């Protein structure tokens, strides 16, 4: 699935501004007969921090995810209405530099996930972690193969390198 979920960061080490320099998002879809992976390396994002608050916005094009099956990728684009809704976003704001919830937007439908649904490990300018989302939260019908539907929960792993864009550094 193209549930891209981008940049969810526990910002305990940040007191500046950052952009995503490079990174990858990989979603995992589970079906009774197989497990499917697709990866996007087209991730854009920004983190703005002050001493009291941090906020972030990250995005990836729906069509940027590639699996080992181009036919499956095209079917996923149709399922997600990628021509009509080309971008998936994730955003969040925190007053304590530790996000307790984030907002995911897929097909212009928004859903808030809490920290039980995501985990972030941040070291210097590197962020790594995951987000578990559910297709049903976005009214997306679970595709099926041989009469068996994929699982409702999709895991998105992310690995991002950040660049400090603060003035004077």
Image (cartoon, rainbow, N blue to C red):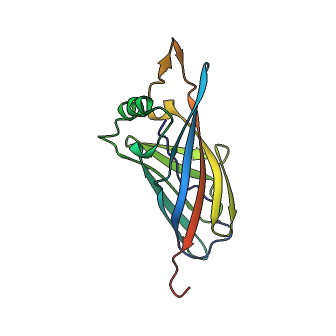
Q: Is residue 150 above or below residue 119?
A: above
Q: Quadrant of residue 35?
A: top right
Q: Is residue 18 above or below residue 77?
A: below
In terms of depth relative to the viewer, which is nearer, 89 or 42?
Answer: 42
Give the residue drawn at x 35%, y 45%.
86
Count of labels shown? 0
Q: Position of residue 114 (x, y in %)?
A: 62, 46
Indicate the quadrant containing the C terminus: top left, top right, bottom left or bottom right: bottom right
Q: Position of residue 76 (x, y in %)?
A: 42, 32
Give left or right: position of 143 versus 31. left
In terms of depth relative to the viewer, which is nearer, 104 or 34?
Answer: 34
Residue extending furthest left? 84
Q: Position of residue 13 (x, y in %)?
A: 68, 70
Give the residue drawn at x 55%, y 23%.
150
Q: Is residue 70 above or below residue 111?
A: above
Residue extending furthest bottom? 168
Q: Is residue 31 visible?
A: no
Give the residue drawn at x 64%, y 43%.
117
Q: Position of residue 153 (x, y in %)?
A: 58, 32
Q: Is residue 20 visible?
A: yes
Q: Quadrant of residue 83?
A: top left
In terms of depth relative to the viewer, which is nearer, 44 or 153?
Answer: 44
């Amino acid at each position: 699935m193209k549930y891209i979920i981008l940049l969810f960061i526990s910002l305990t080490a940040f007191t500046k501004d950052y952009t995503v320099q490079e990174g990858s998002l990989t979603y995992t879809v589970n079906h009774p007969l197989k497990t499917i992976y697709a990866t996007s390396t087209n991730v854009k994002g920004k983190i703005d921090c002050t001493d009291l608050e941090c906020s972030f916005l990250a995005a990836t094009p729906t069509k940027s995810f590639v699996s080992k099956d181009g036919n499956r990728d095209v079917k996923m684009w149709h399922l997600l209405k990628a021509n009509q809704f080309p971008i998936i976003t994730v955003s969040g704001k925190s007053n304590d530099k530790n996000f307790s919830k984030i907002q995911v937007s897929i097909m212009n439908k928004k859903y808030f996930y809490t920290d039980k649904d995501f985990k972030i490990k941040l070291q210097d300018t590197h962020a790594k972690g995951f987000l578990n989302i559910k297709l049903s939260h976005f009214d997306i019908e679970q595709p099926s193969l041989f009469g068996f539907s994929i699982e409702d929960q999709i895991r998105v792993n992310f690995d991002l390198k950040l660049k400090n864009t603060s003035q004077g550094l």
